[in-house]
Amino acid sequence: MTILDGKATSAKYKQAIAAEVAERIAQGKKQPHLVAILVGDNGASKTYVASKEKACNEVGFKSTVLRFPAEMTEADLLKEVARLNADSDVDGFIVQLPLPAHIDEQKIIEAIDPSKDVDGFHPENVGRLCLGLETFVSATPYGIMCLLEEYGVETKGKHCVVLGRSNIVGRPMANLLSQKGYPGDCTVTICHSRTRNIASYTKDADIIVAALGSPEFLKGDMVKDGAVIVDVGITRVPDETAAKGYRIVGDVAFDEVAPKASYITPVPGGVGPMTIVSLMRNTLLAAQRREK
Ligand code: GUN
């Protein structure tokens, strides 16, 4: 069994991005600038945004976090998006999700200029992904594809079962894995909360991407020997023995599944760091495209 080490792989990628940024600056080009909008004080969102800020500093990007109270109106957020769309110093920006219930997330996403949508959530970018055109691939699926590639995991002709049909992970993941070429050429099944007998699918899977948000959902008896396991789950579970009062639990019962797996991502240290570094890659890409 081999651990798909997202921490080590992302560190390597970050070094490469940092080198590219240093070269850009030496050539007199602008420092890539990523802006994150954070509305309200959702704990997980604050953690994500802090990680993104840290990664920006590590690779030499300019980073701005715009924090707004949970009571911010949709109209004011739309104004903020319009302002960032028009700001030539901003290469890419993200609006951290989830947003407070009174704000229509889709409306906000659709207001973002697709050329600055480094999350790859705008319908234009999602559509381009489906068609296999140049786009911003959303960060988690992008990071997973990079990790599979980094370890030379075989994908051609494999049966891949994606657990979860979210717009952010499940759907784009299924799309990428079924595309022509490497890493892709998979036969993909998407399972979700209404799927009957999920184990009948996972037991047949060569590759499983678990993105349900259900702690330790995937048990040892649901996977076949030699399967490749990618765990996207990051649920906070209360734990009085932990310094923060919680621990992060994946969608895979790691201790049961790992002995059967050929490759497996740990939580933490698997998909999470790859997601962050993929956002950095998209931001660099956005800066490069804006120069053309
Ligand atoms: N919330 C959870 N994951 C993400 C992400 O990748 N981007 C944004 N904007 N919000 C998120």
Image: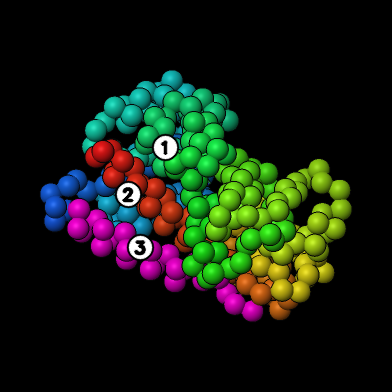
Look at 78% across and 60% down and name the residue there: 202
Please state which of residues 181 and 206 is positioned toward the viewer in this rendering: 181
Please state which of residues 183 and 51 is positioned toward the viewer in this rendering: 183
**Crowd tier of the residue under label 1, counting other residues whose Cα lies within 10 Å: few below 14, some 14–19, many 20 or above:** many
| Range of magenta residues | 1-24
User: Is residue 101 covered in magenta?
Assistant: no
Distance (Cα) linking label 1 and label 3: 20 Å
Q: Is residue 35 left or right of residue 172?
A: left
Look at 57% across and 74% down and name the residue there: 3
Position of residue 239 measured from the top left corner of the image (x, y, whole percent): 62, 65
Q: Mark 1 highlights which residue?
A: 117
Dot 1: what SS? loop
Residue type, numbered disc 2: Leu
Look at 86% across and 48% down and name the residue there: 196
| Vertical position of residue 225 compared to residue 207: above or below | below
| Vertical position of residue 179 compared to residue 108: above or below | below
Q: Is residue 86 left or right of residue 123?
A: left
Residue type, numbered disc 1: Asp
Residue type, numbered disc 3: Lys
Q: Quadrant of the C terminus?
A: top left
Marked residue nearer the N-terminal end (1 or 3) = 3
Q: Is residue 185 visible?
A: yes
Dot 3: what SS? helix
